Image (spheres, rainbow, N blue to C red):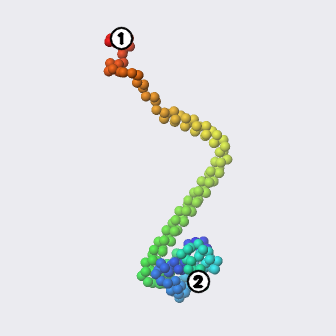
């Protein structure tokens, strides 16, 4: 992102198209009318310094005396048309797809950001009534958890008689009758 636009630097674009950066820039200068300001712009010295600092793979630009160009999505496509090599045309299609995916991702992030803002606003609204709400809810939750604990405790298994048990003892005697030995 440079100047609020999603761009690709001339060195990276030239590498994608399989041409030297110098050849790309020469083709662009020969066809200057095809590259308005919203398609391409030249970086300032401060932007170049920031770019070299943030992007390790562009460290070689640090020692270049010329300022690099930045191409927007449309400028990258136009560069593929100007170069007119089969590799540039093929890569131009991939560049278009990459920019489209970036646009979709930024739209998704914008939607998520909007939803988070809405959630924060709702939370702030609830925070005002939070003190009384939390005391009442805390008591109710404690009662609920206690009731659940009581229900989850397994009942005690029936106790076995102690000592030797005969098969006759297992049958419970009927009320009012005595068993004979």
Q: Quadrant of residue 130?
A: top right
Indicate the position of residue 25 as horizontal and vertical percent values: 53, 85
Of the image marks 2 and 1, the number of the one nearer the N terminus? 2
Q: Which percent across, then down, holds residue 162? A: 41, 22
Q: Which residue is mark 2?
A: 64
Distance of label 2 from label 1 (alpha carbons): 113 Å
Q: Secondary structure at mark 2?
A: loop
Is 39 placed above or below 101 here? below
Q: Residue at x 61, y 78 (%)?
A: 48
The secondary structure type at the circle numbered 1 is loop
Q: Which residue is mark 1?
A: 178
User: Residue at point 58% right, 60% down?
Assistant: 113
Rendered residue at 45%/75% (across/down): 93
Whole-percent x and y of residue 120?
Answer: 62, 54
- Look at the image and tell me whether residue 63 can be seen: yes
Query: Residue 173 falls in which quadrant of the image?
Result: top left
Q: Residues within 10 Å of mark 2 (few under 14, many from 20)?
A: few
Residue at image point 57% right, 57% down: 115
Quadrant placement of the C terminus: top left
Q: Is residue 2 above or below residue 82?
A: above
In the drawing, what numbered circle is on residue 70? none
Residue 164 or 43: which is nearer the viewer? 164
* Above-or-below relation of 179 to 35: above
- Percent across and percent down for residue 176 are 38, 11
| Mark 1 neighbour class, 10 Å CA radius: few under 14, some 14 to 19, many 20 or more | few
């Amino acid at each position: 992102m440079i100047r609020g636009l999603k761009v690709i630097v001339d060195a990276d674009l030239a590498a994608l198209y399989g041409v030297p950066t110098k050849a790309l820039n020469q083709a662009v200068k020969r066809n200057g009318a095809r590259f308005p300001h919203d398609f391409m712009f030249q970086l300032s010295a401060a932007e170049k310094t920031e770019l070299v600092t943030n992007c390790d793979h562009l460290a070689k630009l640090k020692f270049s005396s010329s300022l690099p160009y930045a191409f927007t999505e449309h400028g990258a496509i136009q560069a593929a048309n100007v170069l007119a090599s089969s590799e540039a045309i093929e890569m131009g299609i991939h560049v278009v797809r990459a920019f489209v995916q970036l646009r979709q991702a930024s739209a998704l992030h914008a939607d998520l950001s909007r939803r988070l803002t809405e959630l924060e606003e709702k939370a702030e609204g609830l925070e005002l009534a939070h003190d009384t709400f939390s005391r009442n809810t805390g008591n109710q939750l404690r009662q609920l958890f206690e009731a659940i604990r009581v229900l989850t405790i397994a009942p005690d298994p029936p106790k076995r008689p102690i000592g030797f048990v005969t098969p006759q003892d297992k049958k419970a005697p009927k009320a009012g009758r005595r068993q004979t030995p």
